[in-house]
Image: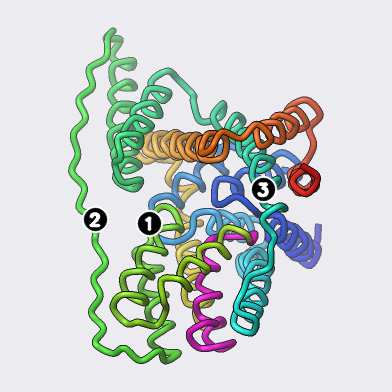
Amino acid sequence: MTPRQRLKDITQLFLKLGVIGFGGPAAHIAMLEEEVVTRRGWLNRSRFLDLMGATNLVPGPNSTQMVIHVGYIHGGLFGLILSGVAFLMPAALITGILAWIYVSFGDLPQIEPLFYGIKPAVLAVILGALWKLGKKAVKSYQIFLIGVAVAILLLLGIDEVVALLLGGIGGMLLLRLRDYLAKNRIEGLIAGITMASLLPTATATETTRQPTLWNLGFFFFKVSCILFGSGYVLIAFIERELVNQYGWLTQGELLDAIAIGQFTPGPVLTTSTFIGYLVAGISGAIVSTISIFFLSFVLVGLLNPIIPKLRKSKWSSAFLDAINVSAVALMAIVTLQLAQTLFLEPLDYIAMLIFAVSAIAQFCFQIGALWLVLGGAMLGLIL
């Protein structure tokens, strides 16, 4: 395959995923796994898991960075740029148009029926990917126990990054101890894992309250440097600084921005596009979008060449195995939380029915994510 054909394939694939990428990071990663591992074979599932584990340890939107990683592997530096731009462009354009409608007419279009059907269909897509990734990540009962331990930490309310680091470092020590005991033919297992993690916290240091393009761009770039875990953490930063400290937005506008992030495809961080438009028009939307995602492109370019080399070291390889199963545990907990919200708050039998139909189509008939999303949207409109 020629380099030009590779770049064309990258652009077409990630434009498609950018259009149908509803449901948040877990859904995006599930769709990405189906396309680049199962259908196209651009990389194997082991490497996909390595990338997934690594992206959970650096700031920025995980699913967007996964897309950029795959683009870099398949198409080099141009693939890195094209994959990210193609994935982000549909959501940014849709969000920008909705922001213009909101500013011009003071309301948002009623698209809730579509999203009502899409959410349970996307949950079925996530479940399918979770099953495949889980089977690959769990290589032994020790690794399974690491995943269970991380899941328990997450359920107890431990911060996502702290839980992943505990799982990675503690799991690495456990796996290396297992190898040492096996090598010396000593039966039994002794494991004691203790770790303290100090994470940087964001502090607002700006003194200006003027909504200039420079201040707007600096705010979103600053957030991108400290944004670990879910993209929804962005909302907390916006509420604290842009609403309470600077007064650039009202609480009502922030709630509408959150709604836009829910109802549009792609990463939730494209909420920045909507907010940028409200603050400074088209220029503000462009600057905000570039500022929030720029660091992800840089981090992928620096991190991607290193990840395969980590497999050559027994210590770093054990760390990756532990981080991978920890990331799968995180994905499982997110899936449970989504299911609880979707089906039980309040009790919704129609959503359960759409999910069941989508799951059967996914597992029994190997229906792709695109058709599941479209089918879910149609069922949402009908039911």
Picture disc at residue 116: 3
Say which of 280 and 381 sits in front: 381
- The kind of secondary structure element at disc 2 is loop
Task: Say which quarter of the image contains residue 173.
Answer: top left
Residue drawn at (39%, 59%) of the image: 233
Answer with left or right where residue 241 lies relative to residue 3. left
Q: Earlier in the sequence, mark 2 or mark 1?
A: 2
Q: Are marks 2 and 3 in contact (CB under 8 Å)?
A: no
Residue drawn at (71%, 38%) of the image: 38
Q: Select label 2 or label 3 by which is in front.
A: 3
- The kind of secondary structure element at disc 3 is helix
Q: Residue furthest top?
A: 187
Q: Earlier in the sequence, mark 2 or mark 3?
A: 3
Q: Inspect the image, locate mark 3, and give the three-letter code of the amino acid beneath it.
A: Tyr
Answer with left or right where residue 81 lies relative to residue 178. right
Q: Disc 1 marks which residue?
A: 228
Q: How many marks?
A: 3
Query: Which percent across, then down, holds residue 109?
Result: 68, 68
**Residue 338 within the magenta-colored segment of the rendering:** no
Residue 8 vertical position relative to residue 132 in the rendered view, above or below: below
Answer with left or right where residue 349 lies relative to residue 3. left
Q: Earlier in the sequence, mark 3 or mark 1?
A: 3
Residue interval drawn in magenta:
264-286
